[in-house]
Amino acid sequence: SESIWVETEKPISVLQARDAFSNAEGLVLMDDPSKKEYPMPLFLQGKDDVYVGRIRKDLADENGLTFWVVSDQIRKGAALNAVQIAQWLLENDKSSFKVHKKRR
């Protein structure tokens, strides 16, 4: 789990961020302030998805947002995440990504 702060080039509303998160593959939006619903590590172990919630405007920066992210670090940690990043790069950014054979 971690609290994340981002600064965007242009202001972004909480609703825009929620929409972007809800449409992102591998992310699950869990953010219903009226029901006090947000991601909690205790209940999300054993899952591959990344859960995001507690999305707030940064009061000190009009282009800033803060949010809370939870994932199972054993399942979504380095191994699965590295594979998913490599897959994305191979599919979307062929110009700057090269696969090198391991030297022995």
Image (cartoon, rainbow, N blue to C red):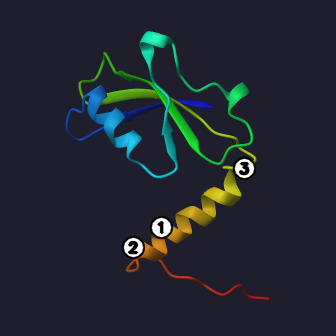
Q: Residue at x 35, y 33 (%)?
A: 18
Label 1 belongs to which residue?
A: 88
Q: Give the percent coordinates (x, y) of residue 53.
A: 48, 27
| Gap in angstroms between the C-alphas marked 1 and 3 | 18 Å
> Disc 3 designates what residue?
75
Image spot of residue 44 (x, y percent): 68, 33
Neighbor class of circle 2 (other Cα within 10 Å; few <14, some 14-19, many 20+) is few
User: Given this view, does label 2 or label 1 mark the residue nearer the observer?
Assistant: 1
**Amino acid on which the number 1 mark rests in the picture:** Trp
Marks 2 and 1, the one that precedes in the sequence: 1
Q: How far apart, in angstroms, are the residues tagged by discs 2 and 1?
A: 8 Å
Q: Secondary structure at mark 1?
A: helix
Of residues 80 and 45, the one nearer the viewer is 45
Tell me the distance, in whole angstroms, between the alpha carbons under discs 2 and 3.
25 Å
Tell me the residue at 59%/45% (across/down). Answer: 49
In the image, what residue type sits under mark 2? Asp
- For the point 40% across and 40% down, the residue is 22
Q: What is the quadrant of the N terminus in the image? A: top right
Verify CB contact (< 8 Å) between mark 2 and mark 1.
yes
Task: Classify 10 Å Cα crowding around label 3: few (below 14), some (14-19), many (20 and above).
Answer: some
Q: Could you say where residue 27 lies in the image, as x and y percent from the top left?
A: 50, 44
Which is nearer the N-term, disc 2 or disc 3? 3
Q: Nearer the viewer, residue 101 or 84?
A: 84
Q: Residue under circle 2?
A: 93
| The quadrant where residue 56 appears | top left
SS for dot 3: loop
